[in-house]
Amino acid sequence: MDFDALRRTMIESQIRTWDVLDPRVLATVAQVKREDFVPTALRHLAFVDFNMPLEYGEVMWTPKMEARVLQELDLQPQDRVLEVGTGSGYFTALLAKMAGMVHSVEDRADLARPVEGRLQVHGIHNARIAVGDASAGWAQHAPYDAICLTGSLPNLPEAFKEQLAVGGRLIAILGDAPAMTVRRIVQIRPGAFETNDLFETEIPPLRHRAAPPPFIF
């Protein structure tokens, strides 16, 4: 298959039509080989406009959503990024190409382990993969200039806003199926946040800590 031709078609017919016009984002999507990160049996579908299934009920976002979120994060070369939910590692690679350092957290070791190899093959050395539960925040390297939650949550834990640097951008998918919203939050000054709802989608939830039972007197 001519993956380069398919990639160009994907960019023109899916990504640009979703108002993704930042030349840095388009160049990054053109550079990172998406077909190297999808499940082998689905490699021929690497550029199709659908949420590609991964193990354990996880998915890769559609190509247009990956590019749109990358644009909304407005990454700079010095930025420190937190990604919650590593998945296949493709979006990790996109983040790493545009930012200074990416800390990606996956709660399943067998998903996280092969990602490191994929990133090395692509010459990406500024991403660190950790295994753990970051669904309520990940303080180890905070504050972050950008935070992206790749799975959905019913509500956003306050810890993520607390771990965001001033000027930092956060993207989260919030709500319950089928009504989920992709939300962008920017800390414009200490303790003051600007919030915008970007578009609706439906993404499998992050595995997260159950809320404690209510205390009954």
Image (spheres, helix red, strand yellow):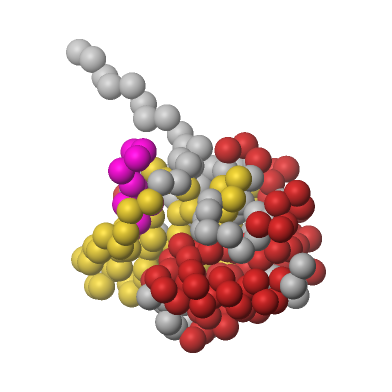
Foreground pick, 34 / 194? 34
- Residue 98, horizontal then vertical, whole percent: 55, 78
In magenta segment, residue 177: yes
Q: Quadrant for residue 166, please give it.
A: bottom left
Quadrant where the N terminus lies? bottom right
**Secondary structure character of the magenta stretch overall:** strand
Residue occupying the point 70% across, 51% down:
42
Q: Position of residue 13 (x, y in %)?
A: 50, 73
- Residue 22: where, in percent of width, then height? 44, 83
Residue depicted at x 75% and y 49%: 41
What residue span does the magenta drawing correspond to? 173-182
* Residue drawn at x 53%, y 51% as measured from the top left: 51
- Decide if residue 186 is in sight here: yes
- The image quadrant of residue 209 is top left
Count of numbered circles on the image = 0
For residue 111: magenta? Answer: no
Is residue 6 placed above or below 114 in the rendered structure? Answer: below
Closer-to-camera residue (41/179) = 41
Vertical relation: 107 (above or below) 99: above
- In the image, taking residue 109 as reference, residue 144 lies left or right, namely left
Residue 55 at x, y percent in the picture:
65, 41
Please report the residue visible at 56 percent of the width from the left and 48 percent of the height from the top.
59
Horizontal side, residue 69 vs residue 29: left or right: left
As drawn, the residue found furthest toward the bottom would be 23
Picture layout, residue 208 above or below residue 142: above
| Quadrant housing the C terminus | top left
